[in-house]
């Protein structure tokens, strides 16, 4: 999934939950952190493992647990954990190194309005051995047209809610 979507979905969720926009913005940036693995020429690597994210964040969480940073740190951790889950449209090493398989979830759904209305939903969970391979050039879109539309709608709704909350 593209970075803008990784960022805007936690942002919208946090503001819906009542977190102020100025606090939700930096917290939501944590959701983009797992994609920093591209700077090391690997993608959907160990940084996309829930196990690794929890293990790497544990010392920081222990450090801030008794401070006023506990809540934003916990929300940032949830935002970071949302990343691999949202990437499940591709093979993602959710439980690496505890489990050596990567997961991919394919969701196919349709609602047809015709002479005989029909609802179709199928969910397939695929697994494949986890392999972290280096790339020479990254061949992935930073954003797509659909992603920009989702980003525009969710960020506009988020800003409108923030403005409405100020009244
Ligand atoms: Zn990713």
Image (cartoon, rainbow, N blue to C red):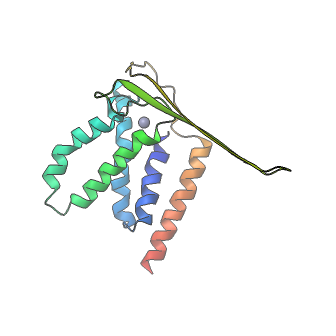
Q: Is residue 112 above or below residue 50?
A: below
Q: Quadrant of ligand 1?
A: top left
Give the percent coordinates (x, y) of residue 140.
Answer: 51, 30
Indicate left or right for 98 with 161 as reference.
Answer: left
> What residue is at 15 percent from the left and 50 percent from the top?
62
Indicate left or right for 33 with 64 as reference.
Answer: right
| Foreground of the two, 48 or 106 | 106
Q: Is residue 76 above or below residue 106?
A: below
Counting the numbered discs, the total is: 0
Image-quadrant location for residue 56: top left
> What residue is at 35 percent from the left and 31 percent from the top?
37
| Foreground of the two, 138 or 76 | 76
Give the percent coordinates (x, y) of residue 86.
Answer: 46, 42
Indicate left or right for 108 with 118 as reference.
Answer: left
Give the percent coordinates (x, y) of residue 155.
Answer: 51, 58
| Foreground of the two, 154 or 88 | 88
Image-quadrant location for residue 34: top left
Q: Residue furthest bottom?
A: 167
Give the percent coordinates (x, y) of residue 161.
Answer: 49, 70
Q: Is residue 167 above or below residue 146?
A: below
> What residue is at 44 percent from the left and 30 percent from the top?
103
| Foreground of the two, 71 or 123 | 123
Q: Quadrant of the C terminus?
A: bottom left
> What residue is at 13 percent from the left and 60 percent from the top?
66
């Amino acid at each position: 999934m593209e970075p803008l979507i990784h960022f805007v979905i936690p942002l919208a969720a946090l503001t819906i939950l009542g977190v102020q926009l100025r606090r939700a913005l930096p917290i939501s940036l944590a959701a983009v952190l797992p994609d920093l693995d591209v700077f090391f020429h690997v993608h959907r690597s160990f940084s996309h493992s829930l196990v690794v994210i929890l293990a790497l964040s544990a010392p920081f969480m222990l450090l801030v647990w008794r401070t006023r940073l506990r809540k934003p740190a916990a929300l940032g951790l949830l935002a970071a954990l949302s990343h691999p889950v949202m990437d499940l449209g591709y093979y993602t090493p959710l439980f690496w190194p505890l489990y050596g398989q990567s997961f991919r979830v394919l969701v196919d759904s349709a609602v047809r309005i015709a002479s005989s209305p029909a609802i179709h939903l199928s969910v397939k969970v695929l697994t494949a051995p986890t392999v972290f391979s280096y790339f020479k050039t990254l061949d992935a879109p930073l954003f797509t047209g659909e992603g920009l539309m989702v980003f525009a709608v969710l960020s506009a709704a988020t800003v409108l809610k923030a403005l409405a909350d100020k009244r």
